[in-house]
Image (cartoon, rainbow, N blue to C red):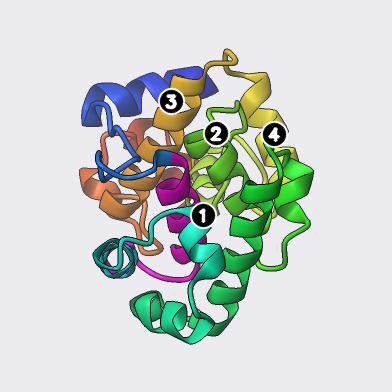
Amino acid sequence: MEVFNLYKLLLDFYGFQNWWPIYSNQDKVAEISIGAVLTQNTSWNNVEKSLQNIIRENCLTFECIAKIDIEKLKNLIKPSGFYNQKTRTLKDMAKLFLIKEKISREDLLSIKGIGQETADSILLYALDKAYFVVDSYTKRLFYRIGLTPENISYSHLQKFITSKLPIDLEVYKEFHALIVKHCKEFCQKKPKCENCFLSNHCNFKKAV
């Protein structure tokens, strides 16, 4: 199984996912960046509740996030959990975007609470920079398909995937979204191999 063939199989089956932004009348960069922080360790349904709270306060901008009372922000993002930590991260991130015109990966990683996955999500979806996002779904699928070792590091898996793909923003965006979709539908922690359209390509099923 070639990496680009996996992308095409997923795209043929699921179609384009068209992730982010969700709200057309909001600041795209702010919405995606804030959402990327909020989605840590929680479901997207909870993130949407938090985003809607922020929108009702007319606060989905970096200017507002930087200025809003910290206790009020905690209350707005409470549905996403870990609101004490996430509030501090959002405040620091907002200040970064307000003082710097060009944001680098190193800038984002310097903020407490932003790791590689969150940084790359912001770079790819918000800033349209070609950084492939690796998450637990990516590691799971690539291991089970037989493309990479189980305990491969974030950076090694990212380099492996991008070495096999054209440098294309839309491919990077859609491939990541499709991996998440597939792992939620079939390649779960307890996989539904019997109904999976990738089962003929999968080493995990053969090993079971």
In front: mark 2 or mark 1? 1
- The amino acid on which the numbered mark 1 sits, given as a three-letter code, is Phe
**Does residue 153 lie above or below 2 as drawn?**
below
Please indicate whether residue 86 sits to the left or right of residue 116 in the image. left
The quarter of the displayed image where residue 48 is located: bottom left
Q: Nearer the viewer, residue 142 or 193?
A: 142
Which segment did they paint magenta?
A: 29-46
x and y percent of residue 60 in the render?
38, 56
Considering depth in this image, is 2 or 71 the residue closer to the camera?
Answer: 71
The verdict on residue 135 being magenta is no
Frontmost of labels 3 and 1 is: 1
Residue indicated by mark 3: 6
> Identity of the amino acid at label 4?
Lys
- CA separation in Å, label 2 and label 3: 26 Å
| Disc with the residue nearer the chain's start (2 vs 3) | 3
Q: Which residue bears the numbered disc 4?
A: 102
Whether residue 187 sits left or right of residue 33 in the image: it is: left
Q: Please tell me whether mark 4 or mark 3 is closer to you in this view.
A: 4
Secondary structure type for disc 1 = helix
Q: Which residue is mark 2?
A: 127
Front-most of residues 144 and 95: 95
Quote the CA–CA distance across marks 2 and 4.
Answer: 9 Å
- Residue at x 61% of width, y 43% of height: 120
